[in-house]
Each structure stands twice: as structure tokens, then as C-alpha cells.
Image: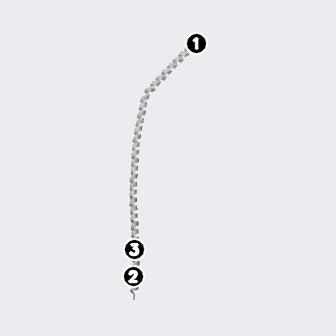
Amino acid sequence: MTRENEQILTAIQSLSQSLRSEVQTEIQSFRVEIQDQLPPFRTEIQAELLSSKTDMQIEFQSFKRDVQAEVQSIKVDRQATDESLKAEVKRWDDRFFKFAEDSTNRSNTLIASATISVIAGVVLILSRP
């Protein structure tokens, strides 16, 4: 190898070393810059997450109240339906028992009328001259 080639090789190695140092310095600078920007960005994300969490909790509480109100409304409707059904069953029971009582009275009246008719017929037959 000639002296000129050695000088070129040395210059290339020196230039390569210099470029490597500059690139490492730039990378380190970029790294520091990113690390400096990271905490505020992290703080913004945490604030947004907290805000979203709070909003979701508020929405959940509202939804929970709505569901509880709906359940309460359904319970009230069911109780009203139960009361109405009980009243209707009582009315039908009263009608049935009144009908049964009326039927019994008719039967007793019919039996009494038949008995009186038979007795009256026998008395009339016996009292005939």
C-alpha cells in the first residue's frame, strides 16, 4: 500500500469516526428532547383518562338511576296489577257464591212448592166427599 492510500484510508476512518460521533450526539440529543417532552404528554394523557373515567362514572350513575327508576316503576305496575287481579278474583268469588246461594234458594223454594202441592193435593183428595 502506498502512502497516499494510507492517508486516504486514515482520512476515511477519521471522517467515519467523526460522523459516528455526530450521529451519536444527535441520537442522544433527540433522546433527551423526547424525554423532556414525555412528562407533559404523560400528564395530558393521565388527565384525559381521569376525565374520561369521571365522565363514565357519571354516565354509569345516571344509567343506574334510570334502571332503578324503571325497576321501581315495573314493581309499582306489578303491584297495581296484583291488586286489580285480587279485586277481580274477589268479585268473581262473590258472584259465584251469590249464584250458588241463589241456586240453593231456588231449589229449596221448588222443593217446598212441590211438597206443598203434593200435601195440598192429598188434603184435597181426602177432603173430597
Asked if marks 1 and 2 touch (Cβ < 8 Å), the reply is no
Residue at 39 percent of width and 48 percent of height? 68
In front of the other: 83 or 47: 83
> Does 78 appear above or below 107?
above
Instruction: State how the image is colored.
Output: one colour
Tell me residue 17's x, y (percent).
Answer: 52, 17
Which secondary structure, mark 3?
helix
Tell me residue 20's x, y (percent).
Answer: 52, 19
In front of the other: 107 or 73: 107
Tell me residue 108's x, y (percent).
Answer: 39, 74
Q: Is 17 positioned to the left or the right of 63 in the image?
A: right
Give the residue at mark 1.
6
C-alpha distance separating marks 1 and 3: 143 Å
Query: Along the polypeptide, which appears first: circle 2 or circle 3?
Result: 3
* Residue 55: quarter of image: top left
Asked if marks 1 and 3 touch (Cβ < 8 Å), the reply is no
Which secondary structure, mark 2?
helix
Give the residue at mark 3.
108
**Image quarter (top left, top right, bottom left or bottom right) of the C terminus:** bottom left
**Image quarter (top left, top right, bottom left or bottom right) of the N terminus:** top right
* Residue 44: quarter of image: top left
Give the residue at mark 2.
120
Mark 2 residue type: Ala
Mark 3 residue type: Asn
Query: Along the polypeptide, which appears first: circle 1 or circle 2?
Result: 1
Tell me residue 76's x, y (percent).
Answer: 38, 53
Label 3 crowding class (10 Å Cα cut-off): few <14, some 14-19, many 20+?
few
In front of the other: 33 or 119: 119
Mark 1 residue type: Glu
Label 1 crowding class (10 Å Cα cut-off): few <14, some 14-19, many 20+?
few
Residue at 39 percent of width and 84 percent of height? 124
